[in-house]
Amino acid sequence: MDGASWNYSKDVVPEVLVCHCVDTEGPLNETLQGTIECLRKTFGLQISESPEALHDLQTGGNLQEPLRSEVIAFLSRRSFKRDWAELDEMLDVLMSAEWRASFRDDFGMDYVFSWFVVDLVGNFLNPRSRSLGFHEIYERYRSRLADSVCRRDRLYWHHHPPSFTREAHKTSNNFSMSNEHLQILARRIIDYLDFPVAFRPGSHCERPDINLFLEQWIPFDFGNQGREESLGESTQRDISSGRFGDWRRAQRQWGFYHPDFHDYQVPGYMNRFIVRCLNIDSRLRVLDEEEIGKAFTQARERGVSLLCFTSHDEREMRPAIQTVVNQIRNCRDSEFPEVKIRFVNAVEGIRKVAGLTRQDPMNLEVALVGNQLKVCASKQTWGPQPFFCFKLRNGQYFFENLDFGLQPQTWSFTFDEDSVEPHDVIAVGLASHDKVGNTVVVRGKPFEDAASWEFKQLNSVDWLG
Protein backbone atom coordinates (compact mmCIF):
# COMPACT_ATOMS: atom_id res chain seq x y z
CA MET A 1 0.00 0.00 0.00
CA ASP A 2 2.83 2.40 0.75
CA GLY A 3 4.42 3.87 -2.37
CA ALA A 4 7.84 3.39 -0.81
CA SER A 5 7.35 -0.38 -0.83
CA TRP A 6 7.29 -0.82 -4.61
CA ASN A 7 10.14 -2.91 -5.99
CA TYR A 8 11.83 -1.40 -9.02
CA SER A 9 14.08 -3.09 -11.54
CA LYS A 10 17.80 -2.52 -11.03
CA ASP A 11 18.38 -2.82 -14.78
CA VAL A 12 17.06 0.63 -15.64
CA VAL A 13 18.72 4.02 -15.54
CA PRO A 14 17.44 5.70 -12.34
CA GLU A 15 15.25 8.75 -12.83
CA VAL A 16 13.88 11.58 -10.73
CA LEU A 17 10.52 12.57 -12.19
CA VAL A 18 9.97 16.30 -11.61
CA CYS A 19 6.33 17.44 -11.49
CA HIS A 20 5.31 21.08 -11.01
CA CYS A 21 1.69 21.31 -9.81
CA VAL A 22 0.30 24.86 -10.03
CA ASP A 23 -2.66 25.87 -7.86
CA THR A 24 -4.28 27.91 -10.62
CA GLU A 25 -6.44 30.58 -9.01
CA GLY A 26 -6.09 33.67 -11.22
CA PRO A 27 -5.24 37.21 -10.09
CA LEU A 28 -5.37 38.46 -6.51
CA ASN A 29 -5.46 42.16 -5.67
CA GLU A 30 -4.51 42.51 -2.01
CA THR A 31 -4.93 46.02 -0.62
CA LEU A 32 -2.96 47.59 2.22
CA GLN A 33 -5.84 46.80 4.53
CA GLY A 34 -5.80 43.18 3.37
CA THR A 35 -2.07 42.81 4.03
CA ILE A 36 -2.40 44.29 7.52
CA GLU A 37 -5.32 41.95 8.19
CA CYS A 38 -3.17 38.95 7.19
CA LEU A 39 -0.33 40.10 9.46
CA ARG A 40 -2.69 40.40 12.40
CA LYS A 41 -4.23 37.01 11.75
CA THR A 42 -0.94 35.20 11.15
CA PHE A 43 1.31 36.72 13.81
CA GLY A 44 -1.06 38.48 16.19
CA LEU A 45 0.63 41.83 15.53
CA GLN A 46 -1.21 44.95 16.59
CA ILE A 47 -0.25 47.48 13.92
CA SER A 48 -1.91 50.47 12.31
CA GLU A 49 -3.28 50.42 8.77
CA SER A 50 -0.71 52.76 7.29
CA PRO A 51 1.93 52.48 4.55
CA GLU A 52 4.55 53.63 7.07
CA ALA A 53 3.76 50.81 9.50
CA LEU A 54 3.91 48.25 6.70
CA HIS A 55 7.18 49.64 5.34
CA ASP A 56 8.71 49.45 8.82
CA LEU A 57 7.76 45.78 9.13
CA GLN A 58 9.28 44.97 5.75
CA THR A 59 12.69 45.49 7.37
CA GLY A 60 11.73 43.80 10.63
CA GLY A 61 10.73 46.86 12.68
CA ASN A 62 11.40 46.31 16.37
CA LEU A 63 10.57 42.62 16.28
CA GLN A 64 12.82 39.98 17.81
CA GLU A 65 13.97 36.72 16.23
CA PRO A 66 12.61 34.33 15.08
CA LEU A 67 9.47 36.44 14.57
CA ARG A 68 11.43 39.18 12.80
CA SER A 69 12.71 36.87 10.04
CA GLU A 70 9.33 35.24 9.60
CA VAL A 71 7.55 38.58 9.16
CA ILE A 72 10.14 39.82 6.65
CA ALA A 73 9.83 36.59 4.64
CA PHE A 74 6.04 36.72 4.86
CA LEU A 75 5.89 40.25 3.47
CA SER A 76 8.40 39.49 0.71
CA ARG A 77 5.81 37.12 -0.78
CA ARG A 78 2.87 39.54 -0.67
CA SER A 79 3.44 40.70 -4.24
CA PHE A 80 0.63 39.38 -6.41
CA LYS A 81 -0.53 39.48 -10.01
CA ARG A 82 -3.34 41.93 -9.38
CA ASP A 83 -5.25 41.54 -12.64
CA TRP A 84 -5.30 39.38 -15.75
CA ALA A 85 -3.06 41.78 -17.66
CA GLU A 86 -0.26 41.24 -15.13
CA LEU A 87 -0.83 37.50 -14.97
CA ASP A 88 -1.03 37.12 -18.74
CA GLU A 89 2.31 38.90 -19.10
CA MET A 90 3.91 36.15 -17.00
CA LEU A 91 2.02 33.38 -18.81
CA ASP A 92 3.15 34.72 -22.19
CA VAL A 93 6.71 33.90 -21.13
CA LEU A 94 5.98 30.64 -19.29
CA MET A 95 4.12 29.25 -22.29
CA SER A 96 6.63 30.34 -24.89
CA ALA A 97 8.76 27.82 -26.75
CA GLU A 98 11.92 29.72 -25.83
CA TRP A 99 11.28 29.66 -22.07
CA ARG A 100 10.23 26.01 -22.04
CA ALA A 101 13.30 24.95 -24.02
CA SER A 102 15.59 26.76 -21.58
CA PHE A 103 14.67 24.17 -18.93
CA ARG A 104 15.00 20.94 -20.90
CA ASP A 105 15.53 17.74 -18.96
CA ASP A 106 18.08 14.98 -19.54
CA PHE A 107 15.85 13.47 -22.24
CA GLY A 108 15.60 16.67 -24.29
CA MET A 109 12.03 17.37 -23.16
CA ASP A 110 10.80 20.85 -22.22
CA TYR A 111 9.53 21.98 -18.83
CA VAL A 112 5.97 20.86 -18.01
CA PHE A 113 3.21 22.36 -15.86
CA SER A 114 0.21 20.61 -14.33
CA TRP A 115 -2.43 23.31 -13.92
CA PHE A 116 -4.83 22.48 -11.08
CA VAL A 117 -7.62 24.94 -11.84
CA VAL A 118 -10.08 26.31 -9.31
CA ASP A 119 -13.59 27.65 -9.90
CA LEU A 120 -14.24 30.33 -7.28
CA VAL A 121 -17.97 29.95 -6.77
CA GLY A 122 -20.43 30.20 -3.91
CA ASN A 123 -18.98 33.53 -2.77
CA PHE A 124 -20.81 36.80 -2.16
CA LEU A 125 -17.94 38.99 -0.95
CA ASN A 126 -14.82 39.61 -3.02
CA PRO A 127 -12.49 42.14 -1.36
CA ARG A 128 -9.41 40.79 -3.21
CA SER A 129 -10.97 41.09 -6.69
CA ARG A 130 -10.73 37.38 -7.42
CA SER A 131 -12.04 35.99 -10.74
CA LEU A 132 -15.37 34.52 -9.70
CA GLY A 133 -17.65 32.19 -11.61
CA PHE A 134 -17.82 28.77 -13.22
CA HIS A 135 -15.11 28.27 -15.87
CA GLU A 136 -13.83 31.84 -15.41
CA ILE A 137 -10.23 30.70 -14.84
CA TYR A 138 -10.56 27.33 -16.54
CA GLU A 139 -11.59 28.84 -19.90
CA ARG A 140 -8.58 31.15 -19.98
CA TYR A 141 -6.10 28.35 -19.40
CA ARG A 142 -7.91 25.95 -21.70
CA SER A 143 -7.74 28.53 -24.49
CA ARG A 144 -4.07 29.23 -23.83
CA LEU A 145 -3.07 25.59 -23.96
CA ALA A 146 -5.02 25.06 -27.17
CA ASP A 147 -2.97 27.80 -28.81
CA SER A 148 0.42 27.03 -27.26
CA VAL A 149 3.36 24.72 -27.82
CA CYS A 150 2.91 23.22 -24.35
CA ARG A 151 1.51 19.91 -25.54
CA ARG A 152 2.17 17.97 -22.32
CA ASP A 153 0.63 20.53 -19.95
CA ARG A 154 -2.69 19.39 -18.53
CA LEU A 155 -5.66 20.93 -16.71
CA TYR A 156 -6.69 19.18 -13.52
CA TRP A 157 -8.85 20.17 -10.53
CA HIS A 158 -8.18 22.42 -7.54
CA HIS A 159 -10.99 23.22 -5.13
CA HIS A 160 -11.49 25.68 -2.29
CA PRO A 161 -14.79 24.95 -0.54
CA PRO A 162 -16.56 28.27 0.10
CA SER A 163 -16.01 29.75 3.52
CA PHE A 164 -18.72 30.14 6.14
CA THR A 165 -18.56 33.91 5.58
CA ARG A 166 -18.75 33.44 1.80
CA GLU A 167 -15.64 35.59 1.26
CA ALA A 168 -13.75 34.62 -1.90
CA HIS A 169 -10.27 34.87 -0.34
CA LYS A 170 -11.16 32.46 2.48
CA THR A 171 -11.96 28.76 2.52
CA SER A 172 -13.60 26.09 4.63
CA ASN A 173 -12.27 22.59 5.27
CA ASN A 174 -15.19 20.48 4.14
CA PHE A 175 -17.21 19.45 1.10
CA SER A 176 -20.34 18.82 3.16
CA MET A 177 -21.58 22.40 3.65
CA SER A 178 -22.49 23.03 0.01
CA ASN A 179 -22.61 21.37 -3.40
CA GLU A 180 -20.30 23.68 -5.36
CA HIS A 181 -17.87 20.79 -5.97
CA LEU A 182 -20.65 18.80 -7.66
CA GLN A 183 -21.65 21.82 -9.73
CA ILE A 184 -18.08 22.35 -10.93
CA LEU A 185 -17.65 18.74 -12.04
CA ALA A 186 -21.07 18.59 -13.69
CA ARG A 187 -20.37 21.75 -15.69
CA ARG A 188 -16.94 20.60 -16.81
CA ILE A 189 -18.47 17.36 -18.07
CA ILE A 190 -21.45 18.88 -19.88
CA ASP A 191 -19.86 22.13 -21.06
CA TYR A 192 -16.38 20.86 -21.97
CA LEU A 193 -16.41 17.05 -22.00
CA ASP A 194 -13.76 17.17 -19.29
CA PHE A 195 -13.57 15.13 -16.08
CA PRO A 196 -10.44 15.70 -13.97
CA VAL A 197 -8.30 12.68 -13.15
CA ALA A 198 -6.07 14.51 -10.65
CA PHE A 199 -6.75 16.84 -7.73
CA ARG A 200 -4.97 19.35 -5.48
CA PRO A 201 -6.79 20.35 -2.26
CA GLY A 202 -7.41 24.01 -1.51
CA SER A 203 -5.15 25.21 1.33
CA HIS A 204 -3.61 21.71 1.11
CA CYS A 205 -6.53 20.63 3.29
CA GLU A 206 -8.30 17.26 3.33
CA ARG A 207 -10.64 15.96 5.97
CA PRO A 208 -12.70 12.73 6.31
CA ASP A 209 -15.60 13.83 4.08
CA ILE A 210 -13.19 15.06 1.38
CA ASN A 211 -11.30 11.78 1.61
CA LEU A 212 -14.46 9.77 0.96
CA PHE A 213 -15.65 11.99 -1.88
CA LEU A 214 -12.33 11.86 -3.74
CA GLU A 215 -12.18 8.10 -3.34
CA GLN A 216 -15.34 7.76 -5.44
CA TRP A 217 -14.18 9.86 -8.39
CA ILE A 218 -10.52 10.98 -8.50
CA PRO A 219 -7.67 8.45 -8.82
CA PHE A 220 -4.70 10.80 -8.33
CA ASP A 221 -4.54 13.12 -5.32
CA PHE A 222 -1.50 15.42 -5.00
CA GLY A 223 -2.28 16.62 -1.47
CA ASN A 224 0.22 14.99 0.90
CA GLN A 225 2.51 17.55 2.52
CA GLY A 226 4.03 15.27 5.12
CA ARG A 227 6.89 17.22 6.73
CA GLU A 228 7.93 18.13 10.23
CA GLU A 229 6.61 21.50 11.36
CA SER A 230 9.38 24.10 11.33
CA LEU A 231 9.95 26.68 14.07
CA GLY A 232 8.81 29.39 11.67
CA GLU A 233 5.55 27.61 10.93
CA SER A 234 4.80 27.15 14.62
CA THR A 235 4.98 30.94 15.12
CA GLN A 236 2.24 31.54 12.54
CA ARG A 237 -1.07 31.13 14.30
CA ASP A 238 -3.20 30.58 11.19
CA ILE A 239 -1.28 27.48 10.03
CA SER A 240 0.33 25.97 13.13
CA SER A 241 -0.70 22.57 14.54
CA GLY A 242 -2.29 21.42 11.29
CA ARG A 243 -4.76 24.32 11.08
CA PHE A 244 -4.64 24.14 7.28
CA GLY A 245 -3.24 21.12 5.48
CA ASP A 246 -2.87 18.68 8.35
CA TRP A 247 -0.42 16.07 7.00
CA ARG A 248 1.70 15.78 10.15
CA ARG A 249 1.31 12.00 10.35
CA ALA A 250 1.48 11.33 6.61
CA GLN A 251 4.27 9.62 4.66
CA ARG A 252 7.44 11.72 4.40
CA GLN A 253 9.05 9.76 1.60
CA TRP A 254 8.60 10.77 -2.02
CA GLY A 255 5.94 8.82 -3.83
CA PHE A 256 2.41 7.74 -2.97
CA TYR A 257 0.29 5.68 -0.62
CA HIS A 258 -3.28 4.39 -0.62
CA PRO A 259 -5.20 5.99 2.27
CA ASP A 260 -7.12 4.45 5.14
CA PHE A 261 -10.91 4.74 5.23
CA HIS A 262 -10.92 6.49 8.60
CA ASP A 263 -7.64 8.38 8.36
CA TYR A 264 -6.47 9.88 5.07
CA GLN A 265 -2.98 10.46 6.51
CA VAL A 266 -2.02 6.82 6.91
CA PRO A 267 -1.79 3.89 4.47
CA GLY A 268 -4.87 1.70 4.18
CA TYR A 269 -7.02 -0.26 1.75
CA MET A 270 -8.60 2.51 -0.29
CA ASN A 271 -7.72 2.78 -3.98
CA ARG A 272 -6.77 6.44 -4.43
CA PHE A 273 -3.12 7.38 -4.93
CA ILE A 274 -2.14 10.18 -2.53
CA VAL A 275 1.10 11.74 -3.77
CA ARG A 276 3.56 13.79 -1.73
CA CYS A 277 3.79 17.38 -2.99
CA LEU A 278 5.67 20.14 -1.11
CA ASN A 279 5.66 23.90 -1.66
CA ILE A 280 8.01 26.34 -3.34
CA ASP A 281 7.93 30.10 -2.77
CA SER A 282 5.85 29.53 0.36
CA ARG A 283 5.84 30.06 4.12
CA LEU A 284 5.16 26.44 5.01
CA ARG A 285 6.30 22.90 4.15
CA VAL A 286 8.90 24.12 1.69
CA LEU A 287 10.86 21.96 -0.72
CA ASP A 288 14.53 22.37 0.21
CA GLU A 289 17.87 20.84 -0.77
CA GLU A 290 17.55 18.11 1.86
CA GLU A 291 14.22 16.97 0.43
CA ILE A 292 15.60 17.10 -3.12
CA GLY A 293 18.46 14.89 -1.98
CA LYS A 294 15.96 12.37 -0.60
CA ALA A 295 14.32 12.14 -4.02
CA PHE A 296 17.65 11.34 -5.67
CA THR A 297 18.51 8.80 -3.00
CA GLN A 298 15.18 7.05 -3.57
CA ALA A 299 15.77 7.04 -7.32
CA ARG A 300 19.22 5.50 -6.86
CA GLU A 301 17.82 2.80 -4.57
CA ARG A 302 14.58 2.01 -6.41
CA GLY A 303 15.08 3.14 -9.98
CA VAL A 304 12.60 6.03 -9.96
CA SER A 305 11.17 8.68 -7.64
CA LEU A 306 8.50 11.33 -8.07
CA LEU A 307 9.52 14.80 -6.87
CA CYS A 308 6.39 17.00 -6.79
CA PHE A 309 6.09 20.62 -5.76
CA THR A 310 3.40 23.26 -5.97
CA SER A 311 3.11 27.03 -6.27
CA HIS A 312 0.45 29.59 -7.23
CA ASP A 313 -0.10 31.43 -10.49
CA GLU A 314 -1.09 34.61 -8.65
CA ARG A 315 2.57 35.20 -7.77
CA GLU A 316 5.56 35.61 -10.05
CA MET A 317 6.72 32.02 -10.62
CA ARG A 318 9.85 32.41 -12.74
CA PRO A 319 12.45 33.10 -10.02
CA ALA A 320 11.23 30.21 -7.85
CA ILE A 321 11.30 27.83 -10.82
CA GLN A 322 14.83 28.89 -11.69
CA THR A 323 15.90 28.33 -8.08
CA VAL A 324 14.37 24.88 -7.70
CA VAL A 325 15.59 23.63 -11.10
CA ASN A 326 19.10 24.82 -10.23
CA GLN A 327 18.89 23.01 -6.89
CA ILE A 328 17.77 19.81 -8.61
CA ARG A 329 20.51 19.99 -11.22
CA ASN A 330 23.19 20.85 -8.65
CA CYS A 331 22.15 17.92 -6.46
CA ARG A 332 22.37 15.57 -9.43
CA ASP A 333 25.71 16.93 -10.64
CA SER A 334 27.39 16.89 -7.23
CA GLU A 335 26.15 13.60 -5.74
CA PHE A 336 24.04 11.57 -8.18
CA PRO A 337 25.58 11.79 -11.67
CA GLU A 338 24.07 8.45 -12.70
CA VAL A 339 20.49 9.65 -12.04
CA LYS A 340 18.53 11.28 -14.87
CA ILE A 341 16.06 14.16 -14.50
CA ARG A 342 12.74 13.94 -16.36
CA PHE A 343 9.99 16.59 -16.41
CA VAL A 344 6.49 15.08 -16.27
CA ASN A 345 2.90 16.11 -15.83
CA ALA A 346 0.94 14.73 -12.89
CA VAL A 347 -0.54 11.71 -14.65
CA GLU A 348 2.69 10.74 -16.41
CA GLY A 349 4.52 10.92 -13.11
CA ILE A 350 2.22 8.82 -10.95
CA ARG A 351 1.77 6.18 -13.65
CA LYS A 352 5.52 5.79 -13.96
CA VAL A 353 6.32 5.63 -10.26
CA ALA A 354 3.37 3.39 -9.45
CA GLY A 355 4.23 0.94 -12.22
CA LEU A 356 0.81 1.29 -13.89
CA THR A 357 0.76 -0.45 -17.25
CA ARG A 358 -0.79 0.91 -20.40
CA GLN A 359 -4.42 0.00 -20.99
CA ASP A 360 -7.03 1.10 -23.50
CA PRO A 361 -9.68 3.45 -22.05
CA MET A 362 -13.14 2.11 -21.36
CA ASN A 363 -16.21 2.74 -23.46
CA LEU A 364 -19.51 3.82 -21.94
CA GLU A 365 -22.46 2.55 -23.92
CA VAL A 366 -25.44 4.82 -23.30
CA ALA A 367 -28.96 4.34 -24.58
CA LEU A 368 -32.38 5.82 -23.91
CA VAL A 369 -35.12 3.21 -23.61
CA GLY A 370 -38.42 4.98 -23.13
CA ASN A 371 -37.76 7.36 -20.26
CA GLN A 372 -34.94 5.26 -18.80
CA LEU A 373 -31.26 5.98 -19.41
CA LYS A 374 -29.20 2.79 -19.56
CA VAL A 375 -25.41 2.74 -19.10
CA CYS A 376 -22.91 -0.06 -19.58
CA ALA A 377 -19.13 0.20 -19.06
CA SER A 378 -16.74 -2.00 -21.02
CA LYS A 379 -14.49 -2.42 -17.97
CA GLN A 380 -14.42 -1.71 -14.26
CA THR A 381 -14.86 1.94 -13.36
CA TRP A 382 -12.66 3.75 -10.86
CA GLY A 383 -15.38 4.18 -8.25
CA PRO A 384 -18.72 2.41 -7.78
CA GLN A 385 -20.34 4.08 -10.80
CA PRO A 386 -19.83 6.80 -13.42
CA PHE A 387 -20.38 10.41 -12.43
CA PHE A 388 -23.84 11.26 -13.75
CA CYS A 389 -25.22 14.78 -14.25
CA PHE A 390 -27.77 16.63 -16.33
CA LYS A 391 -28.74 20.16 -17.33
CA LEU A 392 -32.29 21.51 -17.33
CA ARG A 393 -33.88 24.00 -19.68
CA ASN A 394 -33.83 26.63 -16.93
CA GLY A 395 -29.99 26.46 -16.87
CA GLN A 396 -29.62 24.44 -13.68
CA TYR A 397 -27.09 21.59 -13.44
CA PHE A 398 -27.60 18.57 -11.19
CA PHE A 399 -25.61 15.56 -10.03
CA GLU A 400 -27.53 12.37 -9.34
CA ASN A 401 -26.77 8.77 -8.44
CA LEU A 402 -27.46 6.00 -10.90
CA ASP A 403 -29.40 2.85 -10.08
CA PHE A 404 -27.31 -0.33 -10.27
CA GLY A 405 -28.21 -2.95 -12.88
CA LEU A 406 -28.38 -6.69 -12.42
CA GLN A 407 -25.25 -7.23 -14.49
CA PRO A 408 -21.80 -5.96 -13.42
CA GLN A 409 -20.87 -2.50 -14.69
CA THR A 410 -24.42 -1.57 -15.70
CA TRP A 411 -26.60 1.24 -14.37
CA SER A 412 -29.76 3.15 -15.18
CA PHE A 413 -31.68 6.29 -14.34
CA THR A 414 -35.39 6.96 -14.77
CA PHE A 415 -36.66 10.39 -15.76
CA ASP A 416 -40.23 10.91 -14.52
CA GLU A 417 -42.37 12.98 -12.19
CA ASP A 418 -40.46 11.70 -9.15
CA SER A 419 -37.08 12.87 -10.51
CA VAL A 420 -37.20 15.28 -13.46
CA GLU A 421 -39.50 15.20 -16.43
CA PRO A 422 -37.78 14.17 -19.69
CA HIS A 423 -38.88 17.28 -21.56
CA ASP A 424 -37.10 19.49 -18.98
CA VAL A 425 -33.67 17.97 -19.68
CA ILE A 426 -31.50 19.45 -22.44
CA ALA A 427 -28.23 17.58 -21.77
CA VAL A 428 -26.87 14.65 -19.80
CA GLY A 429 -23.29 13.85 -18.95
CA LEU A 430 -21.51 10.74 -17.74
CA ALA A 431 -17.83 10.35 -16.96
CA SER A 432 -15.51 7.84 -15.40
CA HIS A 433 -11.89 6.88 -15.04
CA ASP A 434 -10.56 3.35 -15.09
CA LYS A 435 -8.10 1.79 -12.65
CA VAL A 436 -5.06 3.33 -14.37
CA GLY A 437 -6.53 6.80 -14.84
CA ASN A 438 -7.78 6.71 -18.42
CA THR A 439 -10.87 8.88 -18.77
CA VAL A 440 -14.06 8.62 -20.77
CA VAL A 441 -16.67 11.40 -20.92
CA VAL A 442 -20.07 11.15 -22.60
CA ARG A 443 -22.44 14.01 -23.32
CA GLY A 444 -25.83 13.66 -24.97
CA LYS A 445 -29.14 15.30 -25.72
CA PRO A 446 -31.26 12.18 -25.49
CA PHE A 447 -34.70 13.73 -25.59
CA GLU A 448 -34.22 15.69 -28.79
CA ASP A 449 -32.31 13.10 -30.77
CA ALA A 450 -31.61 9.76 -29.10
CA ALA A 451 -28.67 9.12 -31.43
CA SER A 452 -26.81 12.37 -30.75
CA TRP A 453 -24.22 11.11 -28.28
CA GLU A 454 -20.72 12.56 -28.30
CA PHE A 455 -17.77 10.58 -26.90
CA LYS A 456 -14.35 11.82 -25.93
CA GLN A 457 -11.51 10.09 -24.10
CA LEU A 458 -9.01 12.16 -22.13
CA ASN A 459 -5.51 11.56 -20.76
CA SER A 460 -5.12 8.35 -22.74
CA VAL A 461 -1.87 9.67 -24.27
CA ASP A 462 -0.13 10.52 -20.99
CA TRP A 463 2.02 7.39 -20.90
CA LEU A 464 5.79 7.57 -20.68
CA GLY A 465 7.92 5.13 -22.66
Image (cartoon, grey):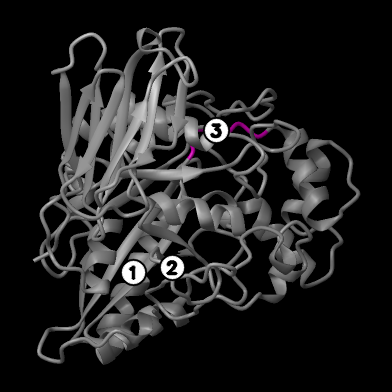
The residue shown at (27%, 81%) is 332
Quadrant placement of the N terminus: bottom left
Q: How far across and how far down the image is residue 272, in percent?
A: 40, 63
The residue under the point 26% across, 70% down is 17
Q: Amino acid at mark 3?
A: Glu
Residue 372 position within the rendered picture, expressed as x and y whole percent measured from the top left: 30, 24
Tell me which corner region of the image, top left, top right, bottom left or bottom right, holds residue 422.
top left
Q: Which residues are magenta?
A: 25-30
The alpha-carbon separation of the residues under discs 1 and 2 comes to 37 Å
Q: Earlier in the sequence, mark 1 or mark 2?
A: 2
Earlier sequence position, callout 3 versus callout 1: 3
In the picture provided, is 353 more to the left or to the right than 140? left
Q: Which residue is mark 2?
A: 270
Q: Which mark is residue 180?
A: 3
Q: Indicate the amino acid at tag 2.
A: Met
Q: What separation in Å lies between label 2 and label 3 (alpha carbons)?
A: 25 Å
